[in-house]
Image: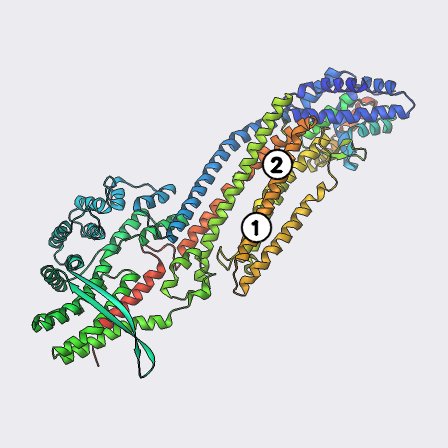
Amino acid sequence: MTIGKEMTRGVAEPIILNLLNNKEMYGYEIIKVVNEKTNNAFQWKEGTLYPCLHRLEAAGLIKNEWQIAANGKPRKYYTLTRKGAAELAVKQEEWNLFAKSVNVLLFA
Amino acid sequence: MKNDRIENLLDELSSGLQADPEMRMDVKSELRTHLDDKIAEGENAGLSETESSEQALKSFGDIVAIADGLVAANASRMKLKARLWRVAAILLIPAVIICAFISFFQLASTVAILDIMSSFNSNIIKPPTWMKRSAELFGKSYTADECFILDGDTTKHEPWQQQKALSDRFPSNKVYLANYILQLINAVNNKKVTRQYIYSELKRAEKLDPDNAFYNYMLAGVMLQKACSYKTQIKSLKDGKKKRKRIKEIIDFKINDRQLFKQAMQEYLAGTKKKHCHSYSMQLMRQRLNIMGEPTNFATNLDQIMFAAGTVIPHVSLYRKLTQVLPQYAKLLIKEQTQELALRYIQSWHYFLQHQLDDSDYFISVLVLIASAKRFADDLPSLYQELGKKQQAGITKTQLLQVIEVREIWEKGKYDYRKDLNKMSILGSMILPALGIKFSEQDLASSRRIEYINVEKSVIVILNILFIGGMLVAIGVIVTWRWRTGINAILLTPPLRTIGKIFLWGIITPIAAYLLISTLGTIGGHQYNLLYNSAFYFQILLLLTLMPYITFHLAKKYVSNRCQQLEIGLPAHKRWGNSRIIILWSSMAILTVAALIPHAYIQFGKVTSYTFFTAIGLTFIYLLLIIVHTIAKFLTSFHQRQYAIYYGALAKTLLPIFASAVIFLTFTCIPYLNWREANLIKQDKIIFGAPGAFTHAEEKTVAYFKAQLEKALNSKPK
């Protein structure tokens, strides 16, 4: 079973922030990790990821750094900024509250 | 085919970002890598290249939605960036134009300084009109009256006519009257001025300032020039007994016009009875210098020194003439049996010397006065004796010998300036040695430093010219590539960190290195003046070559990296490319050591032309190599059509970096150097910033002499 676009849209940003909190990553890598970790329950596409990454960067929550691979190909890596780390903590708390509230309403 | 499809997709995805070519290329490059990864993954899973590409392209889904998403995500950043560049362009363009003007102005003042210095050396005295110009260059403006006081009536041709106009305009002003008379006497050999006119003008002046002996003496002096001739000849005689050479002065005195001679001597005698004697030369100079304002920089100060040095003092030679003639006339009167009149003339010496002392404001006039005393001492005591005035002979001899002794004491204590010649400022070494005063290291330092500051200002101006020149070349490159390929140059915005790095290593570090070297006396050689400090040429060379080179190199490095990220084709990097900066630094180090070798000679007091030829020769070769290298690089790039985008981006990105460098140098270094210069001029106790006098040193020396001479002239025999 896959999760609908509407469901994932709201959580895409906190998920990216959390992934980048652990290590620097590039776009293709993020999609792969998300899809693998959720057993393809999340099926992120480029159209979801890149506008989201650019939004986060414009907001100063993440920053990019180009690295040139051994084959001479450039690759853009993203890392979390301090502002992003703070935002992540807020979002995580927010999600906890949201999940609890939704659980109460859906399964009580 | 595959690549074309990918490129078409990327073009479509980024079509909304056209307004910001750099961002569009950035997004395309990011998505291209993503697609490449995806295709490679498909191929690894066993798909064919075409299948894998097909799958990767399809996975992007709704292209229009992604393109819209990217525009929405980046819109605010694009707007902000565009706005920032617009503001930067609005600020940078006029700022660079202002900087160019400031640089031109500084350059003009340097040229003015060199011009004045060279004319100072060749003793060509410039007219006052010329002097004003440099002060005007520094924002000084004069009222019509001030101009008139400074120059007189410049519509008139001859200096005496110009100054007569000033005196006529202010008829009750004794200073302007005396000034006109001085100019008139100076024109005594001018065929357009008759002697009769000079006599009549002197008579008129005498009536206007009746208590001033100056006009009587001047009239007498001018008349004597015509009425008699006075020549001296030095002959060495052999003294048979002592087998030693003896020097004897033979005076050849002839009266050409006895009537005029008598008239002149009567005029002289009338002068000795007057209350005071003033040519007001110094007063006028002070008034004019006050109008020119307190000097705050080398150029205006040099103007004032030159202005003071150009003051005409023809009266001093007329005083000398009177001193020569007086004993001769007394001798003649004794011979003609008019003892009483002879005694009156002999007795007048004291009043005359006292008057001369009143009017001695310059070092040269003080020395002439002592020479007058020497002349009197040779003849007057013996003439008194001849007239039977033994006591007066004794008093006169004592007083005159004491006057002469003032100079002898000064001569004995005279400092041998040659020891300090390399430590004195260049200007100082031209005007101070005659004074024979010993100056402390600290005193010498300030005027020397002022000269260094002026060269440093010129270096900043040259750097500005190099950077502005670089900007013009960059504009040329942008236009040329646009014309040849039709591609607009892309501006690659360096992040603040990169800009900081370029400034730190390209601008601040070379300046800091120079400041450090220049403050370390032994290495920097700033304890010597500019002419003796060969190491200084290399310090300048360091600034002139390293600053533009490092700035350019770091900017180029950034552009190359960025082009690699954006997958813009760029010329192959030579293997030794990265070590170029190391090569540059080491060659500079070697050249500096080479410069220090002749510099070390100075430490032992030896200065040879080798010092200069080594420094200037190496500097020239080095600069030539850099120029040849730059031109060669430029010409090579011209044929590399495939790298048009790279060269365009490099040129366009260099523009704001070079502009910022020019603005930084102009608005930090030049004000700082001006401020230091103004402070040093205030601090200087030898040459600069003398309040309306030639130099502090001359003023002090003259004050010392005048006090001693006053005492000697009025000394009483024990």
Q: Is residue A63 above or below residue B38?
A: below
Is residue B431 visible in the rendered structure shown here? yes
Element class at badge 1:
helix
**In this figure, which residue is indicated by the disc labeled 2?**
B631
The front one of B259 and B581 is B259
The residues tagged by marks 2 and 1 sit, at their Cα atoms, a distance apart of 21 Å
Amino acid type, callout 2:
Ile
Check the image and tell me how it is coloured.
rainbow
Q: Residue at the spot x=86%, y=29% of the render?
A: A37
Q: Residue at the spot x=61%, y=31% of the render?
A: B651
The front one of B6 and B591 is B591
Q: Chain of mark 1?
A: B
Element class at badge 2:
helix
Q: Is residue B426 above or below residue A55?
A: below
Query: In the current view of this chain or complex, which residue is farthest to the bottom?
Result: B241
Q: Residues within 10 Å of mark 2 (few under 14, many from 20)?
A: few
Q: Image check: B216 left or right of B614?
A: left
Q: Residue at the spot x=56%, y=34% of the render?
A: B471
Rendered location of residue B393, percent (x, y): 17, 78
Which part of the image, by quadrant, shows the N terminus of chain B? Answer: top right
Mark nearer the viewer, 2 or 1? 1
Q: Image check: B367 left or right of B34?
A: left
Q: Is residue B52 above or below residue B350?
A: above
Rendered location of residue B584, percent (x, y): 65, 46
Query: In the current view of this chain or complex, which residue is farthest to the right?
Result: B46
Rendered location of residue B305, percent (x, y): 35, 53
Amino acid type, callout 1:
Gly
Q: Residues within 10 Å of mark 1 (few under 14, many from 20)?
A: few
Rendered location of residue B340, percent (x, y): 7, 72
**In this figure, which residue is indicated by the disc labeled 1?**
B617
- Tell me, yes or no, whether the two marked residues, 2 and 1, touch with CB atoms within 8 Å: no
